[in-house]
Image (spheres, rainbow, N blue to C red):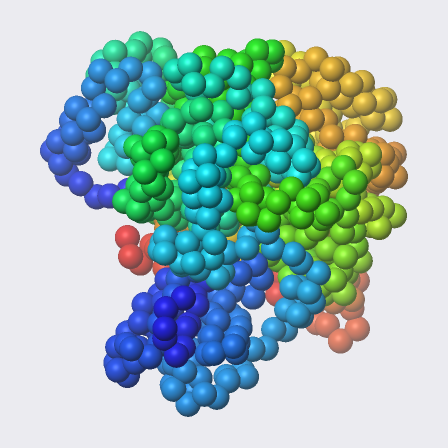
Amino acid sequence: MDNYRAHVLVCCGTGCTSSSSAKIMDKLNELVKANGLENDCKIVKTGCFGLCAQGPIVVVKIGDQETMYYRVTVDDAEEIIKEHVVNGNVVDRLKETPNSDPTAFYSKQMRIALRNCGKINPDHIEEYIEHDGYKALGTILSEKRDPDAIIQELIDSGLRGRGGGGFPTGLKWKFASGNRGQGITKYVCCNADEGDPGAFMDRSILEGDPHSVIEAMAIAGYCIDAHQGYVYVRAEYPIAVERLGHAIEEAREKGWLGKNIQGSGFDFDLDIRLGAGAFVCGEETALMRSIEGKRGNPTPRPPFPAIKGLFGKPTILNNVETYANIPMIINKGAAWFASLGTEKSKGTKVFALGGKVNNVGLLEIPMGTTVREIVFDIGGGIPNGKAFKAVQTGGPSGGCIPASLLDTPIDYDNLVAVGSMMGSGGMIVMDEDTCMVDIAKFFLEFTVDESCGKCAPCRIGTKRMYEILTKITDGTGTLEDLQALEDVAVALKNGSLCALGQTAANPILSTLKHFREEYVEHVVDKKCRCGVCKNLLTYTIEKDNCFGCGMCAKACPAGAISKTDYTAPGKKLPAMEIDPSKCVKCGACMATCKFKAIVKK
Amino acid sequence: MSIIKMTPEEQSAKFEEVLSKFRGQGQKALMATLQQSQEIYGYLPLPVQRKVAEALDVSVAEVYGVVSFYSFFSLKPKGEYAFNVCLGTACYVKGSQALLDKIEASLGIKQGDVTEDTKFSISACRCVGACGLAPVVLVNDDVYGRLTPDEIPGIIAKYKEEA
């Protein structure tokens, strides 16, 4: 960073931007000017700090002292500048974080892929370079390193694909590295089509440190002799697209992309391709069809993309987070990386922690950290004193991990063993109020929507399973339906063309395994213990709280509410009651009752 | 995505610009052409698709196949104020379905539809990535986080005043 006495870092990730961090940034800049601090204090736009629950986050850095401010508003900007930057007094008021402990949030983390997020300005290539950026690529090019040796280094590091599947990255590169120097067109692609709902790891990396991905893709190009790369990124991520675009421009200007990179004779360029909201395009063959401008239908493998990929040419495709690790592995060596993590899963993993947990945010932990440490130490536990029920990983392809398995150390193989999967890194915490049948239905609704429809097991199977789950949540399910769910799930797993269908049943199978009693309750007792499944609820009027005003009866569209002959003590009019046989469970009565006398159970 | 207000003439001129930029590039330019066309019109009606097909020299069926495959492309116009409810997992477990129900009830239209006066439309999306603010509703580019259903009528009233 430049030689200013004070730096004020403002998080401009999507989460904080949504709560107006851009306006805070403008205000801070305005104040710096108004107070004549232009040579003294610099306002820096950064990527995600991680603790999104307490955003917008602003960090003041004076010398070695770093102070983090939470939930900052535009009106707080003046106090930060005048009190802290000018007078040197920390604004204690803005350091308070009700319900969460930032020290615990950061203590168990280790940042490799996120190393620069929240530290550097993603729009300034110089800041990346100051933090060892382009050092790996520079060294490789200047030493004219043997591509096979670099690939071997990656294999030795034990790096596995961070997009979900966990395939060894070095092997993927090796398969595509044949016939170098023979003028064969090859491509390097980056999967930034982060489709799992509740996952924002890749987006945060692109927003906070886009050059790390660009550098790694150029290294990949060097290793397999490819000269063109594509980053396939969701159109729903406008900030990430803009910063990546800017970073590519800057890299071209500074000679890190384009013809004859740094005078080495190696050519490599990058282009962005925008996705258009199809979850299946996270699958590698579908993604390549989409870059080609076609419907994102997966194609059978083999041939694998390493042999015949984009436009029919050998292609490697890695995920954003995978790429972000690579410059560090080159700089620090395979042995360093392999010393982190568990036996079969090396390094760290980024997770987006969300749902019913205090410290919602982005975190990076060494492999082998337990689910309990993430939810209760880093995540700060469950809000409002509720009980923990499950953690969902792997999005619509993953499953739910119950309380009994909280001590599972996280790595690729352990998560599969408990019926879930690593996925790209979404981690959603659920408390006692979350109905597991409803959650399974939620994911199935998603896969029904997102199934591309090409192969029958997926197209029909997901739909049938969704229908059965709807029956169960409507209260018309039978015990045979539970068996049918399991039967269809097996057919889906064995018969589907791509991973979307093969894993679509996981949310059902894992909830059936760990929360079967909830399914049985829905089917046999016609009850939803969490009060989520509308058709299994009954609305009742607590007669002793009822003033008999009759507003509920007027609101009821089904005419199910009538007067009783009971008048509660202290009330003037007789209480009302609901006829359950006429009630359509719309909830209109409950919404109109001023006295909160209507409850659903 | 926000809809830029343009007169029909401005729209046609802008659309011609996009078409000439990609003309003759074939299927590989299809996604980008459609994305930029949708930015102009807010949606992709059939006449637009026909012109895109002609410019890129691919069949209309191919264009329609791509438009109907991707959820980002819309065959229906959006309202002046487009409500977009996040139904990503993090928002869902925090009650975004109740927000969607409330918006539907308040505006009297269903998800995917537009009010008769074309002022409002409702859609749902899968994760905008603002999980720290869950549950989240977007109205055009304005983000409303940590919402409860009780706050919905106030938000709608605000836009009705503007409209």
Residue A523 spot, x, y in % from top left: 83, 33
**Residue A44 location, quadrant:** bottom left
Determine whether A43 is above or below B103 in the image: below
Residue A442 spot, x, y in % from top left: 65, 36
- Can you see residue A387? yes
Q: Is residue A557 left or right of residue B123?
A: right
Residue A382 spot, x, y in % from top left: 73, 60
**Residue A78 location, quadrant:** bottom left
Q: Which residue is located at x 24 percent, y 43 percent?
A: B4
Determine whether A567 is above or below A519 in the image: below
Q: Which residue is located at x 50 percent, y 48 percent?
A: A205
- Can you see residue A552? no
Of residues A30 and B161, which is closer to you in this image?
Answer: A30
Residue A322 spot, x, y in % from top left: 57, 39
Which image quadrant: the N terminus of chain B? top left
Q: Is residue A381 left or right of residue A589?
A: right
Q: Is residue A322 left or right of residue A485?
A: left
Determine whether A564 is above or below A440 in the image: below
Of residues B93 and A14, which is closer to you in this image?
Answer: A14
Q: Is residue A578 left or right of residue A82?
A: right
Of residues A70 and A336, which is closer to you in this image?
Answer: A336
Q: Which residue is located at x 80 percent, y 58 percent?
A: A387
Q: Check the image and name the residue furthest to the front.
A: A143
Q: Which residue is located at x 43 percent, y 38 percent?
A: A141
Please state the total of marks drawn on the protein image. Answer: 0
